[in-house]
Image (cartoon, grey):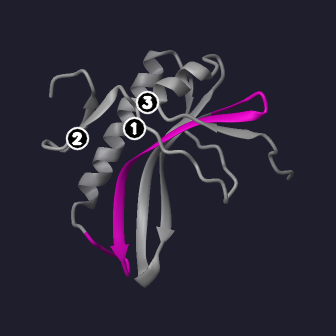
Amino acid sequence: MGSFSGHFIGYARLEEWAEAIAILDPVYACLIAESESGPLDIRNDHYFIHCAQPRGGAVHYFRTKVALVQRVNDVLLKEDHEWRLERARQAWEIVREWLQERGFAICEAVVAYPRDLKLLEGEGGFMGYDKERGYFMLANQPA
């Protein structure tokens, strides 16, 4: 299989990405986990909401980190990992609903990227995180 020679265009805000893509073409979006190993058998599992649309020789994408789970020798560093994963799933549902409300057709999948590509991490301006209560919500919505 040949390699993709197009461009990867990352957006810092979900709203900007949504304005730049074609509403009639499928959007590949989902909650994904990426693991990285560090020194001393530390493993970081980063959870991202990732949205992409290949179009015109380029992949337009947005992604934002919504959770981090850390392990040392496969032992969790914090016991709140289930809570963190639930918050990540909650954030994904907010983004999925936001996209659907705007008429985007979502395919829960991810576009594969070259291994050495450093992807931009952004944010969704319409979504906030209540640190006191520990959950994601729409930014202009009372807690």
Q: Residues within 10 Å of mark 2 (few under 14, many from 20)?
A: some
Pick whichever of labels 2 and 1 is earlier in the sequence.
Answer: 1
**Amino acid type shown at disc 2:** Tyr
* Image coordinates for residue 124, horizontal then vertical, percent: 40, 32
CA separation, marks 2 and 1? 12 Å
Q: Residue 56 lies in magenta, yes or no?
A: yes
CA separation, marks 1 and 3? 6 Å
**Amino acid type shown at disc 3:** Arg
- Nearer to us of marks 2 and 3 is 2
* Image coordinates for residue 4, horizontal then vertical, percent: 80, 46
* Image coordinates for residue 38, horizontal then vertical, percent: 46, 75
Q: Residues within 10 Å of mark 3 (few under 14, many from 20)?
A: some
* Image coordinates for residue 2, horizontal then vertical, percent: 86, 51
The residue located at (24%, 53%) in the rendering is: 83
First to last magenta residue range: 53-77
Q: Quadrant of residue 125?
A: top left
Q: Residues within 10 Å of mark 1 (few under 14, many from 20)?
A: many
Q: Disc 1, disc 3: CB below 8 Å? A: yes
The residue located at (42%, 72%) in the rendering is: 43
**Amino acid type shown at disc 1:** Trp
The residue located at (40%, 25%) in the rendering is: 97
| Residue 76 - label | none
Label 3 sits on residue: 96
Nearer to us in this view, 58 or 108: 58
**Magenta span: helix, strand or loop, mainly?**
strand
Judged from the image, the secondary structure of the residue bearing numbered disc 3 is helix
Label 2 sits on residue: 135
With respect to residue 140, does 29 lie above or below? below
Judged from the image, the secondary structure of the residue bearing numbered disc 2 is strand
